[in-house]
């Protein structure tokens, strides 16, 4: 698969390029920049996944402690009731938070496709400026026609550099 890495001078030029590529129906685009671009930023589902994992963790561990204390190993300690639920709440809450944090940790790595130790775009000359002052756009395609169409769409924006690499 072939790809091109296009560098722009400013964030506004990068956002204009993203808008033009979106209007042209070209997909398979990745941006590399010091800050995330404002245009087309999608909301992550990760906070909702963490919330659901926390609720399910709390409910699951609360149910597990209830089963263990009431059915599996009941003890009569000082006349307390068989189902003494207030004692289960703190540890169930802590384990629910633990479930949410583990979901967030693993979900972050999945969303960022990490750990990816090597990507062919790392070999490009302009890629070193991505975290400092570069506004880069990578477009991957199976066929040369799609890359040619992307170059045509981006040509009026006068990119600083265009590098082709094998993805």
Image: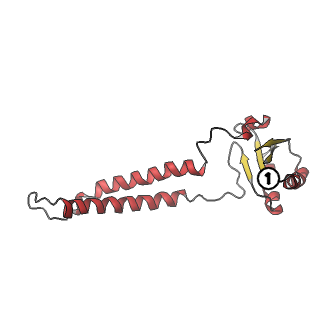
Q: How is the image coloured?
A: secondary structure
Q: Quadrant of residue 61?
A: bottom left
Q: Is residue 151 left or right of residue 83?
A: right
Please state, as top left, top right, bottom left or bottom right, where the C terminus lies in the image: top right
The percent position of residue 150, horizontal first and vertical second, equals 85, 54
The percent position of residue 10, horizontal first and vertical second, equals 79, 45
The percent position of residue 96, horizontal first and vertical second, equals 38, 56
Residue at the (69%, 38%) spot, across then down: 131
The percent position of residue 109, horizontal first and vertical second, equals 56, 47
- Residue that label 1 marks: 141
Which of the pair 64/45 is nearer the observer? 64
Q: How many marks?
A: 1
Q: Quadrant of residue 46?
A: bottom right
Residue at the (73%, 48%) spot, across then down: 31
Residue at the (72%, 37%) spot, across then down: 122
Residue at the (71%, 51%) spot, across then down: 37
Disc 1: CA contacts within 10 A as few (<14), some (14-19) or many (>=20): many
Which of the pair 94/163 is nearer the observer? 163
| SS of the residue under disc 1 | strand
Q: Is residue 160 above or below residue 47?
A: above
Q: Is residue 64 left or right of residue 33?
A: left
């Amino acid at each position: 698969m072939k790809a091109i890495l296009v560098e722009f001078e400013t964030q506004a030029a990068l956002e204009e390029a993203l808008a033009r590529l979106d209007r042209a129906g070209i997909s398979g685009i990745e941006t590399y920049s010091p800050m995330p671009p404002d245009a087309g930023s999608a909301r992550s589902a990760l906070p909702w996944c963490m919330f659901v994992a926390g609720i399910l963790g709390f409910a699951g561990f609360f149910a597990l402690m209830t089963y263990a204390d009431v059915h599996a190993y009941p003890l009569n300690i000082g006349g307390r009731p068989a189902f003494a639920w207030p004692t289960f709440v703190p540890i169930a809450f802590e384990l629910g938070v633990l479930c949410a944090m583990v979901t967030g940790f693993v979900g972050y790595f999945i969303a960022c496709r990490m750990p990816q130790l090597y990507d062919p775009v790392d070999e490009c000359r302009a890629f070193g400026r991505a975290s400092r002052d570069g506004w880069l756009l990578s477009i991957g395609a199976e066929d040369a026609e799609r890359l040619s169409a992307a170059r045509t769409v981006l040509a009026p924006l006068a990119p600083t550099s265009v590098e082709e690499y094998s993805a």
